[in-house]
Image (cartoon, rainbow, N blue to C red):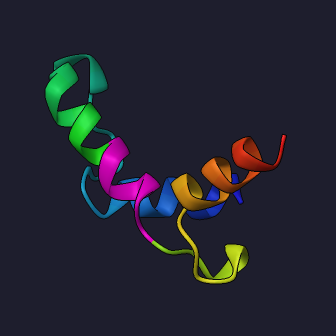
Amino acid sequence: MNEHTNGLIRRFYPKGTDFSQVSHRKMAELEHILNTRGRKSLGYHSPNEVFLTHLLVA
């Protein structure tokens, strides 16, 4: 799953990007986009949905 996430990040930032030059705000925006995007491996649910479901069950 990590390799897939890396591929998603590369859609926004090409290989070789110096992430020390990317603002915290831009990184937070990307994090939000990726965490609210449905994933086939999660039954087309977003990582946020799966996380919240697990929290509610506990």
- Secondary structure mostly seen in the magenta stretch: helix
Residue 22 visible in this rendered orientation of the protein: no
Residue 36 lies within the magenta run: yes
Quarter location, residue 26: top left
Q: Is residue 22 left or right of residue 48?
A: left
Report x, y in % for residue 17: 27, 37
| Residue 32, visible in the rendered structure | yes
Q: In percent of the image, x 81 and y 49: which residue is there?
A: 57
Residue 54: give x, y in percent of width and height. Answer: 76, 49
Question: Quick check: 45 above or below 19?
Answer: below
Q: Is residue 55 left or right of residue 36?
A: right
Q: Which residues are magenta?
A: 31-37
Residue at image coords 28%, 53%: 14
Instruction: Check the picture and name the quadrant holding the C terminus.
Output: top right
In the orientation shown, which residue stands out farthest toward the top? 20
Q: Residue furthest right?
A: 58
Q: Nearer the viewer, residue 30 or 16?
A: 30
Indicate the position of residue 15 as horizontal and vertical percent values: 35, 49
- Left/right placement of residue 17 relative to residue 36 reads left
Residue 40 pos. (x, y %): 63, 83
